[in-house]
Amino acid sequence: RHCKKSVPIKLINSGWAADFNLMTWALSAGHVANRSISFKPRVAWHYSALMEELPSGRKVVKDRSTSACKSQDLDCYFLPVSICPSSKYLPPIPLDDFMRTNFKKPDVVGLIAYHKQWDDEKLQTFIPNKSMRNLLAKIKLFRSNKEISAKKFYSALLYDYLSRPKQEFRVQIAAKVAELDRLKRGNCAVMHVRRGDAKIMVGWFRKYHDVSEYIEAGKPFLEKRGIKQIFLLTDSSLAIQEAESQFPQYKWIYFNRERYKADEGGFENQLPSKSPRIESTYLAATMELVKRCSVIMKSNSHLSHLMHWLMCAGRKMYDDGDGTSEYACPDSIVIGSHDHDELVSETGIRSNR
């Protein structure tokens, strides 16, 4: 019955976290509107296929031989979002169009989903499986813990649902997680140093920051918890050199993978290896590994915020050791929380970072 009203929502092809944020909103809106939701790229999902932008602005698949799978969409990695099959004939529509069509006040949909309706058991008529029932149970458990905002917990759980890996991808993620198994639970910190568009988007809300700024702001929390291991996440190989040369007192943990140098990749070009599957595997593994740590040092970024939310929902008092099952957010240090108030010009002295 619900599948007759199924709506394919267009994937935005922005960044890993931005794409999943859109999907969480779409699922919420679909639930409130009593419509089943699926997700579909206009051409291909940029984490499943290597894309390029033509002079006209239209994006096309650059090299099909590097695609993660034939469908070049979410199906390459993840289990279906819904029991309703995705239509081969209906073109995907932007989420904004769906919101305007189905709601008089689209802005309140998120609030309705966050606080009132998402744990309604009627949702199981849309996606009647064990994963969703587990999600509902976790949300009910969360409501007794007032230390975590609804947005953080809700977004993290929906990400976990949307990113349920297929068996092949699950094995690939596990292999990458095993590479960094030396990352100690409860005794590590996450540092997310975003360099690419932080250098090239002048006057935007995101600003360039030295590694020293992260350390200076996070040092009290690192010392309080006796942390020496830092899980360094960055899109620039030069940030790793900066961290290890300036702060050798810390044990820097990071994936040995291809990276651009600062902004050489350009805006929203997240595939330095030119392999969508490799990049997606590293990202999915990272989302699992960050849950081990008890401190996060970050700047303004959809990805760093998503990691923070996952750390909130994925930690059960690792470091406090009180034996309870309550969820606890890590210490969070936001570098440049007011960057959007400043005009930033990244030139000259920082051009090689």
Image (spheres, helix red, strand yellow):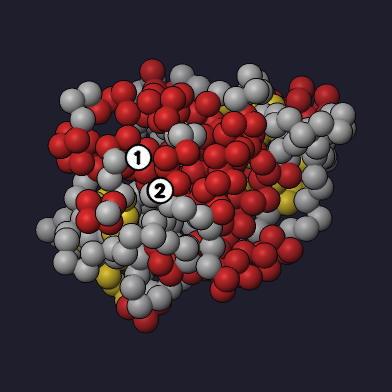
In the rendered image of this protein, does residue 252 appear above or below residue 149?
Answer: below
- Residue at 39% x, 56% y: name it: 82
Q: Nearer the viewer, mark 2 or mark 1?
A: 2
Figure quadrant of residue 102: top left
Q: Nearer the viewer, residue 170 or 46?
A: 170
Q: Amino acid at mark 2?
A: Thr
- The image shows residue 188 at horizontal and vertical percentages of 77, 41
Q: Nearer the viewer, residue 54 or 276?
A: 276
Q: Nearer the viewer, residue 317 or 101?
A: 101
Q: Amino acid at mark 1?
A: His
- Counting every numbered tag in the picture gives 2
The 10 Å Cα crowd at callout 2, few under 14, some 14 to 19, many 20 or more, is few
From the viewer's perspective, tell me whether residue 3 is left or right of residue 111. Answer: left
Answer yes or no: do the residues labelled 2 and 1 have beta carbons within 8 Å?
Answer: no
Indicate which disc residue 175 carries. Answer: none
From the viewer's perspective, tell me whether residue 310 is left or right of residue 7. Answer: right
In the rendered image of this protein, does residue 222 appear above or below residue 74?
Answer: above
The 10 Å Cα crowd at callout 1, few under 14, some 14 to 19, many 20 or more, is many
Q: Nearer the viewer, residue 241 or 298?
A: 298
- Considering only order in the chain, which callout, 1 or 2, is on the residue closer to the N terminus? 1
Q: Which residue is mark 1?
A: 31
Q: Which residue is mark 2?
A: 125
- Residue at 73% x, 44% y: name it: 292
